[in-house]
Structure formats: structure tokens, C-alpha cells
Image: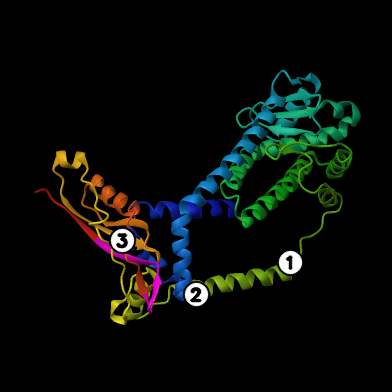
């Protein structure tokens, strides 16, 4: 649930911002966040402006990293598919019969196929709609049958819990949120707990926890190189898993962790209460004006000046043919150098071609605007402008 929350939050934020103008988005509650949190307003505006200027580069870098991780994930899936193919694996009738018996014990209704692979180093559970267990050929001759049977039971537990599918979802979230250290920490913990849960399930169904511990100890003698996408018996920390099976420990409360969690929870509640505390109407108005980067001319600040004579939009031919007219209201972010960094439509004419023509003219204008000033210093500021479309 924690990992899914990490994925849902940015998706929800992205969807909530679709079709929302800059002014309405700022007035919706994010505008006064830096002031409520005690951040320096000019520093916050400079960071926001820098992000606006380099947003496309950040997105491109993120896409490149996601593409590389997707290629890595695809290579892992091809690796698994190659080992599961009939050219690299072969059936074993005796073990297949034992798999069928274990399927009944684990109450798995579908058919679980067993294949033997010569150049594999650890048992694997793969497949979603057609689950399959891959057994290393070396283990058939190098490990006692009763121990290998327990490793197979561990893989049956993964199939029972649909861990292969869940692991693919987990890997996809890791790929999209690769930049977030909390995602990697949560994901590592999930993989560790998943192996322990599969051990508990296999031990409970077979009634042989000590034999499973011996099988894991024997597995440590083999070299294993399976990818994370497959559910392998050697996952997690083998020694800790063996200790759990041989001598289960009663879970005790970690007071240090409890105190840390309590402190974090209290801080979050306090921050939430502070952000949602009602303030006077005049104070809210002032905070919104400052945080959106609009100059307060009553205090002697100067708003940026955008000259449409120098950045005149071209009337779209399609709009001329349809005789479209109206007024486009736009917010433009003007840097200290006079460059128009970004422009957003506040109120549309109702005709997208006319609105897009104004945005393109401002963002691609080669003539610099007059930058605004706050407290006598040039600052990155937003200014509201309008362009009237009319036919003579």
C-alpha cells in the first residue's frame, strides 16, 4: 500500500493539474505554501523560475532514464522467456507428478508446469496465466530429493500468492519513480518480506519448517544469478530466513522506531493543521499576490511590460476562414533578463488556434520584454496581458 501510494500521489497531482490555468492553480492553495512554511519568498520565486526554464530538460532526462530502465526490464523478461522455452528446458514426469500433488495441497486450481533447465542455478517461479517452475538440472542430481522438494514448495507459495504479477507491478513503479529513495527502500523491504511470507506458507502447508531451513542452507552452496523479475528461492537474506524457520522469535516492539514514527506523525499533523488554519482575508490576498510573483505597484514595485507590437501573433489561417474573434487573457513569466520564460492562458477565447498563437508569439519572441522590479531589484515576475483578435 505504501508503494502504491507513492505511485498514486504524482498521478493524482498530474491529473488534477490538467486543464487548470496557472492563476487558478495558484489560488487553489499552493500559492501560500512557501510563506506558511517560513521559506524566503524571493528564493522560492527564483527556484520556481529556474524549474520553469528547465522543466523540459528535466522531463527529457527523466524519460531517458525511464527508457533505459525499461530496456533493462525488457531484457530480464527476455532472459526468463528464453529459459522457459522448450528449446532451453525439458519436462520431468516424476517431478511434474509431485508438482500436481503440491498444487492440491496449496489449493492452486490452475495447472502448474515444471521444466528442467540445465544451465540454471536456482529454482524460479515465472508466468502469470500459465505459471511455471524452472528447476536447475544440477540440483536434481546434487541435492537430496526431500530438500529440493521444499524449495519447490517455496516456489509454489509464490505462485499461490501471484507474486510474479505483483513483482512486475513493483518493478514498473520502481522504473517510473527511480529518483525517489523512499521507493527503493520500500521496495527492498517488500521483497524481503515476500520471501519470508513464502517460507511461512510453504512451512505451514508441508509442516516441515526445519527441512525448509536445511534446503535453504543447501541452496547457499549453489551460485545463483537470476534476475529480480523472477521469484527465486534464494531471494532475501538466506541466513535470517533460516534462523526464522529454525528458531522463530516473538516480535517485540522497537521503541526507537515507535518514537521516530510518533515524532514524524506529530510533525505531519502539525504541518497539516498549520496549512489549513484560517487566516484573515487581507493576509491571504497579500500572500497570493506575492507567491504568484505579481508586482504590488502600491508598494512601488513595477510589473513587467510585454509589447505585442514586438511580439505580434499571426492570425491563424484556419481562424480567418472561420472568422473567429475574441480576447485571449494570458499570464507571462518574465525573467530578469527580459526573456519571456513561459506563458499560460488564463481565459480562453473559446478558439484553441487563437490562444495557441498568442502563447507561441510570446514564448518565441526574440525581442525582450521590460523586466519587473520588487523592492527596487529586478525579479522574475508574472504579468497578466491580453490580446484582442478582431477582423477589420
Q: Quadrant of residue 282?
A: bottom left
217 displayed left or right of 42: right
Residue at which label 3 appears:
331
Q: Secondary structure at mark 1?
A: loop
- Give the CA separation, mark 3 to mark 1: 55 Å
Residue 310: image location, x then y, percent? 26, 56
Q: Nearer the viewer, mark 2 or mark 3?
A: 3
- Between discs 2 and 1, the one toward the N terminus: 2
Q: Residues within 10 Å of mark 2 (few under 14, many from 20)?
A: few
368 displayed left or right of 265: left
Q: Secondary structure at mark 2?
A: loop
Q: Nearer the viewer, mark 2 or mark 1?
A: 2
- Between discs 2 and 3, the one toward the N terminus: 2
Q: Nearer the viewer, mark 3 or mark 1?
A: 3
In this rendered view, identify the residue nearer to me: 96 or 269: 269
Residue 139: image location, x then y, percent? 86, 29
Residue at which label 2 appears:
39
Q: Give the main secondary structure, helix, strand or loop, of the magenta stretch.
A: strand
Q: Quadrant of residue 255?
A: bottom right
Image: magenta residue range: 374-385
Is residue 378 in the magenta section?
A: yes
* Contact, mark 2 vs mark 1 (Cβ under 8 Å): no
- Give the CA separation, mark 2 to mark 3: 24 Å
Residue at which label 1 appears:
253
Amino acid at each position: 500500500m505504501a508503494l502504491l501510494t507513492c505511485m498514486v500521489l504524482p498521478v493524482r497531482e498530474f491529473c488534477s493539474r490538467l486543464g487548470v490555468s496557472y492563476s487558478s492553480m495558484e489560488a487553489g492553495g499552493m500559492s501560500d505554501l512557501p510563506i506558511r512554511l517560513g521559506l524566503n519568498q524571493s528564493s522560492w520565486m527564483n527556484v520556481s523560475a529556474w524549474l520553469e526554464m528547465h522543466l523540459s530538460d528535466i522531463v527529457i532526462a527523466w524519460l531517458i532514464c525511464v527508457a533505459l530502465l525499461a530496456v533493462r526490464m525488457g531484457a530480464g523478461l527476455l532472459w526468463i522467456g528464453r529459459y522457459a522455452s522448450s528449446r532451453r528446458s525439458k519436462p520431468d514426469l516424476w517431478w511434474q507428478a509431485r508438482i500436481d500433488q503440491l498444487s492440491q495441497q496449496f489449493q492452486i486450481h490452475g495447472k502448474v508446469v515444471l521444466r528442467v533447465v540445465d544451465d540454471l542455478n536456482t529454482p524460479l517461479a515465472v508466468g502469470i496465466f500459465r505459471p511455471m517452475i524452472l528447476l536447475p538440472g544440477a540440483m536434481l542430481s546434487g541435492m537430496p530429493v526431500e530438500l529440493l522438494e521444499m524449495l519447490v514448495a517455496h516456489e509454489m507459495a509464490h505462485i499461490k500468492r501471484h507474486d510474479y504479477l505483483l513483482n512486475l507491478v513493483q518493478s514498473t513503479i520502481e522504473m517510473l519513480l527511480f529518483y525517489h529513495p523512499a521507493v527503493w527502500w520500500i521496495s527492498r523491504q517488500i521483497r524481503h518480506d515476500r520471501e519470508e511470507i513464502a517460507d511461512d506458507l510453504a512451512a505451514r502447508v508441508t509442516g516441515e519448517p526445519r527441512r525448509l531451513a536445511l534446503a535453504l542452507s543447501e541452496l547457499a552452496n549453489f551460485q545463483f544469478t537470476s534476475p529480480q523479475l523472477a521469484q527465486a528461492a534464494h531471494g532475501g537474506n538466506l541466513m535470517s530466513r533460516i534462523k526464522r524457520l529454525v528458531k522463530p522469535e516473538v516480535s517485540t516492539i522497537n521503541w526507537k522506531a515507535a518514537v521516530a514514527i510518533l515524532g514524524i506523525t506529530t510533525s505531519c499533523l502539525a504541518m497539516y493543521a498549520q496549512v489549513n488554519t484560517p487566516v484573515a482575508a487581507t493576509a491571504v490576498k497579500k500572500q497570493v499576490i506575492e507567491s504568484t510573483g505579481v508586482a504590488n505597484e502600491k508598494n512601488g514595485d513595477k510589473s513587467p511590460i510585454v509589447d505585442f507590437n514586438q511580439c505580434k501573433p499571426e492570425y491563424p489561417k484556419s481562424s480567418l476562414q472561420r472568422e473567429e474573434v475574441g480576447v485571449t487573457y494570458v499570464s507571462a513569466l518574465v525573467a530578469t533578463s527580459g526573456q519571456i520564460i513561459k506563458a499560460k492562458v488564463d481565459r480562453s477565447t473559446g478558439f484553441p488556434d487563437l490562444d495557441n498563437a498568442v502563447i507561441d508569439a510570446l514564448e518565441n519572441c526574440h525581442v525582450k520584454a521590460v523586466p519587473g522590479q520588487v523592492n527596487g531589484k529586478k525579479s522574475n515576475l508574472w504579468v497578466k496581458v491580453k490580446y484582442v483578435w478582431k477582423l477589420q
